[in-house]
Structures are given as structure tokens and as C-alpha cells.
Image: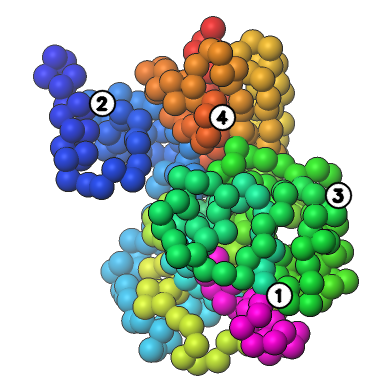
Amino acid sequence: MVDDMLRTPDAIREAERWTAHNYHPLPVVVAAANGAWVTDIDGRRYLDCLAGYSALNFGHRHPALISAAHAQLDRLTLTSRAFVHDQFADFCRELALLAGKELVLPMNTGAEAVETAIKVARKWGYQVKGVPAGQATIVVADGNFHGRTTTIVSFSTDAQARDDFGPYTPGFRIVAYGDLAALAEAIDETTVAVLLEPIQGEQGVVVPPAGYLPGVRRLCTERDVLFVADEIQSGLGRTGETFACDHEGVRPDMYVLGKALGGGIVPVSAVAADRAVLGVLRPGEHGSTFGGNPLACAVGTQVVRLLATGEYQRRSAELGAGLHESLRALIGQGLVAVRGRGLWAGIDIDPALMTGRQACERLAARGVLAKDTHGSTIRLAPPLVIEADELSYAVDQLAAVLN
Ligand SMILES: *Cc1c(COP(=O)(O)O)cnc(C)c1O
């Protein structure tokens, strides 16, 4: 046991020694995982209440996903898009049907899918809407998180994400999230798209005011602008519906998907839109060596099939209602605010008590993994396979930490 206790600090020191410090991980070295639980190198078990920032919506190593991956590893892993492979059509068709769109374009990471959406929206603007060459603008929201590429950080409002990474890509206008009047003001004849998260995850699970998303939809339709919904974190069951936009009955022109689409096994992302939008791309104009590879498609198809059952959305909605109720009971007992939908919560801890980081360290010491976002805010996003008693355990540990 004494020997065991030494392994975690050593492993952390070694990891820090050999990598750029672009993350500040909690002091836990994970070695194995199953379902909602992970085990560290010292044999300690933790309930995973982050779920890989929602990349693990179906839990660690879901049997259907692992078996699809194993089977595919034994047959074919990569062709590049220079050839067609036998997993491609199923994935694209089933994802398109799930999204209610005519076409899908697979990529790998979320940032690549956002870049794809930006490129498609601009091309659509020039070729379909008739925006003068080089003039396209895209309206985005304050507090957004869409990824880490140079273009994407160009329209971030987070200094940490943006500072010293310029020169920045032009063509973006930033408006207050949730403010329809500001959005209406920012749109003009050069505007090709409004790019938004229907719930802002990294910002602390910020839900816009009721009526905002339908208002965005209406404005985009009236002004001939594409509504692009970045559902990379909010989509695929996280909020209790397939897409967070579903809560308000809104259908964007383009969905941007990622994270859970790869089942926690491989990076898989995609955009989904109708032919009138995605049809603007011609051979040679956009691509990715690994995008839509056989292993990604085999896993992604199973992810879509899990979602098509509706079971995970239902679990998120039902368990999420209980989670939010028990979290709201902690307001005034160390919590100052609770936001979110389904099994997704942003909680603000009383900053006089401790930082979000300190709370997460104390939660980890009690066997619950979560991650702070900004300041005193923590995001809870457990895998959708979590059980009600496990969820109560997590909330009990949070209550104990706040005490
Ligand atoms: C995580 C995330 C991204 C970026 O995805 P990566 O796979 O990390 O590139 C983009 N948008 C949203 C809303 C995200 O949560």
C-alpha cells in the first residue's frame, strides 16, 4: 500500500516532464474504466462525472461499441476517401436520418467539423446567396467555445484561448449570447451564417432564455442566413433529447457534431445539412485523410443506432430531472446557481468557499471526477449509463465537499 501510494505522484511528474503544459489535470492517473467508473493506477475507483467532456455519453467501453470496434479492427481500418469502403454509406445514411438532414460530411475532431461548417457556409454565401467575393460574415456569440484552430480562436472571447495566437481570421461578428435584438442588428447582406451552441458548454452550461433559439431560427430564415448549431457537446443525448435544439422545436440548417459520435473510442465528427447547403462542395475543395475512415464509421454507426433507440435520451431526461432537483436543494448550502438540461449541469460554487478547482480536487479525493470550467463553476456531465444511486452518491459527495 505504501508503495502504491507513491505511484500516482511519480506518474504525474513524469507526464508533466514530457509534455507541453496546455492542460492542468486533476491528480488522478487513470488506468482502466468501465461504464460510469474509472480505476486509477493505485486501484482507487472514481465515478466519472465528466465523461470526456461528453465524448463518453454511452459510458466507458460500451459493449456494443467495443464489439463493433473489435470486429472492424479485424477487417479494415483505413482506406482514405480515395476509395469507398463498405462502412461509409451506412454511417452517413443513418446519421443523416437521425439528424433529419439529406447529407452528412464526416471529419475527425470537433474543431475540424466547425471549420467545415464555416467553409461550407462561406461557399454557400458566395454561390447561393450572392454575397460579393471575400465579404462573407458569420455572426457568433460572446462566451462561445467552438474549438482551438487559429480561425476558431479568432472569434473566441476567452483571453486564454485567444491571446498571442493572432493574426486573427477576419469575417466574424460577436454578439451577446441570448440577445435577439443584438443578433438582428449584426446580420446584414454579407452575413452567411449564425454559428451558436444551443447551450454553451465550456462557458458553464449556459442555457439561453426561452424563445431565443426559435427567434434565431426565425431571423435566419427571414434574412436568408444559415443557422449553424454547434451540438458537439450538447447533442447526441446529453440534454435528454437527441439535439439540444429539439427542446425548443428548432431545426438548424446545419448540425455540427462530434465528441460522443466516436463512442469514446475514436475521434469522429461530422456536419449534417440538406443538399442545398452541403451540395456546394465539389471534389477537391475540402477533405480529410482520416475523416469517415472505416473504424470511425463502424463505431459511429453503432452510436447512431444506440441513439435511435431513444433509451439514452430518456435516461438523460429522467435522471437529469432528479439531478437538477437535488442540486437545486444545495443552493444556499454552498451553491449559488444551477443551470442545464438533462444529465448536464453547470453549478456555481460560492466563491467565498473555494474555487471550482479546489472543489474538484476534493471531489476526486471522495471518488468523484468532475472538472471546473471558469472560476467557481463546475460542469457535471456523467455518462448517460449512470444509475440513479450512483448519481445520488455524486451529489452526496458534492454536498460533503461544500460543507
Ligand atoms: C469540444 C467542443 C468543440 C471542439 O471539439 P474538439 O474535438 O476538441 O476539436 C467544439 N465545439 C464545442 C461546443 C465543443 O464542446
Q: How many marks?
A: 4
Overall secondary structure of the magenta section: helix
Q: Of marks 1 and 3, which one's residue comes earlier in the chain? A: 1
Residue 42 can be seen, yes or no: yes
Nearest the viewer among 255 and 226 is 226
Residue 254 can be seen, yes or no: no
Q: Of marks 3 and 4, which one's residue comes earlier in the chain? A: 3
Mark 2 lies on residue: 43
Q: Residues within 10 Å of mark 4 (few under 14, many from 20)?
A: many
Residue at the extreme top:
403
The residue mark sitting in front, 1 or 4, is 1
Note whether 143 is above or below 256 in the view shown: above
Could you say which quadrant of the image residue 8 lies in?
Answer: top left
Note whether 60 is above or below 170 in the view shown: above
SS type, badge 1: strand
Query: Disc 1 residue type?
Result: Val
Query: Which numbered marker is on residue 377?
Result: 4
Give the colour scheme of this rendering: rainbow
Nearest the viewer among 181 and 379 is 181
Alpha carbon distance from label 1 to label 3:
22 Å
Q: At x 50% / y 88%, what residue is drawn?
A: 285
Could you say which quadrant of the image residue 210 lies in?
Answer: top right
Q: Which residues are magenta?
A: 113-136
Contact, CB < 8 Å: mark 4 with mark 2? no
Mark 1 lies on residue: 192
